[in-house]
Amino acid sequence: MKSVVRFAFAASTLCLAAVAQAASDPVLDAMGAELARSQAAYFKAAMPAYFIAYRINDDEQIGVNAEFGTLTNSSSMHVRSLNVELRTGSYAFDNTHAGASDNQPGNLPGYARGNATARIGLDDDVRAMRAEIWSATDGAYWRTVEELSKARADAAVQTAAEDKSDDFSREGKLELIEPKLDYAIDLDRWREKVKAYSAPFKRDAKIYNARAGLTVARTTRWLANSEGTRVRHAELTYLLDVAAATKAADGMDLPGMVRFVASRPDALPDDATVLAAVEKLMADLKALRDAPVIPAYEGPAILDNRAAGVFFHEVVGHRLEAHRLRDENDAQTFKKKLGERILPESISIAFDPTRAEFAGQALMGGYAADDEGVRARPVAVVQHGVLKNFLLGRTPVDGFAHSNGHGRSQSGFRPVSRQSNMIVDVENPIDYDALKKKLLAEIAEQGKPWGLIIRDLDGGFTETARAGTGGAKLLPTMVYRLYPDGREELVRGVDLVGTPLTLLAELEAGDGRFGVFHGWCGAESGFVPVSTVAPDLLIRRVEVQRKPKSQDRPPILPAPDAEGR
């Protein structure tokens, strides 16, 4: 598995209180009618199904974008997708069971089996929706028949699986109908705003790409399954982003971005705040062009809070997603470490999809029910440095027979266990100045000429498969050398790399200055929105390597200046 997390490009979740069963919903009506017919037929077939779930996602998006003060895009998008999940066999052993054929080219992994996806009509035409659901269900059923036969054949000839848990968990019925969300945006006003936000970049002829844009995204998700669960979940996002890029004299591409996420329009920043962020971004890019490139290095470093958030997400979070503990091709880093210390005693980690915000900032990884129809709940995974729990969807693992509400997916994918809002807590935190003094002490103790402070980044990714490196990589953008005399120097050209157990063993301390990283996390079930709340972090020893470098030279002719010369 290779996972990637980047800055947020859309949906921040707005969790709303559940209300009593709403008036008739044509989408749920269509799903319910076809569920009744499908259960009557496929549950009594020669190779009977035992579980069916229908998911319909309705995604709407409007956006306005400008580059260098000129409007470049004003568009809208509206799509609706259907996902059918069908299982044959039993909760104990079904068509998703891992087997030898998983390693054969072209065969679907367990989490993708019994799955059918389709683009469906936008009109709430119950008859048309039922026809589309019927067709997709029939296709999914015949695939599961073949998959179950292969799974049984594999089980007869292969060695016994290490984890003998059931293939699917039994969960209670859930009825949760959230109100649909309306949004309104003055597009004419925002066309002028994004033009004004992108116009200052014209002053720097060495900034080659610059844009500002507002995206408003509304998603409604429906779920109905054969266990009686009925869910309608609503999400709404207002995303304002400013991004620009320049190039150093040696050809290195230097990107930068600022993003603002809100769940309602009046929570977006005012013009003065955005324009101040634009000016800072321009100053950072200018400074990066002139910054020296540093060589590969190992030594002590501070990761400022947002960078620390990506560190915890990639190095710890993905290795807590429990469905991979059933995958014999996965490294399963933490599988045998339950009850052991994996972090300093002062650090605890919880995932809380029920939390809507932190310090006034909307959190993106929230929801009232997950995509498998299990109610969301907080999960304490690390307490005082000791591993206590994993994130679970409806794929059980040894010692954990039930979901804890973390089955998540992008439209068109089957859910697996995924991260939500990660909250990293530090007991008795020190302040930032004390953390910096500790970094200076580490520099002296290790005899290094300097240490690093990573203040901002573009995201990161990790590999968890045994056949891969098992490592993680963070993609810093703003990195400073800290010299023994306290002087700081901006540098460029490095990525942070390392393997999880080695990196975690080098954690020294965290402070009380928390920040939030918002991103889209990509893994087996597509991209899902996540947030991580983390403090600044001191690591005794990190490794950085040179970034890939473009071979393209800067343009021979500079861009026109602000006066068009």
Image (tube, helix red, strand yellow):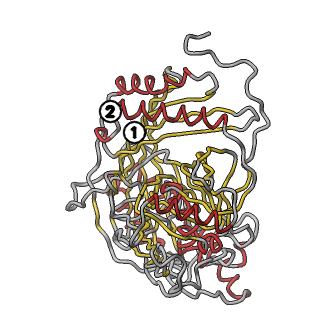
146 left or right, relative to 552 = left
Residue 263 position, x and y percent, is 33, 46
> What residue lies at 28% left-to-right and 53% top-to-bottom?
25
| Quadrant location of the N terminus in the rendered image | bottom right
In terms of image quadrants, where is residue 215? top left
212 left or right, relative to 564 = left
Report the residue marked by disc 2: 185
Please say if 98 is above or below 38.
below
> What residue lies at 65% left-to-right and 73% top-to-bottom?
502
| Quadrant location of the C terminus in the rendered image | top right
Please say if 477 is above or below 503.
above
> What residue lies at 41% left-to-right and 58% top-to-bottom?
513
Which element carries disc 1, helix, strand or loop? strand
Which element carries disc 2, helix, strand or loop? loop
477 left or right, relative to 74 = right
Any part of residue 43 in sight: no
Report the residue marked by disc 1: 216
Please say if 342 is above or below 206.
below
**Disc marking residue 486:** none
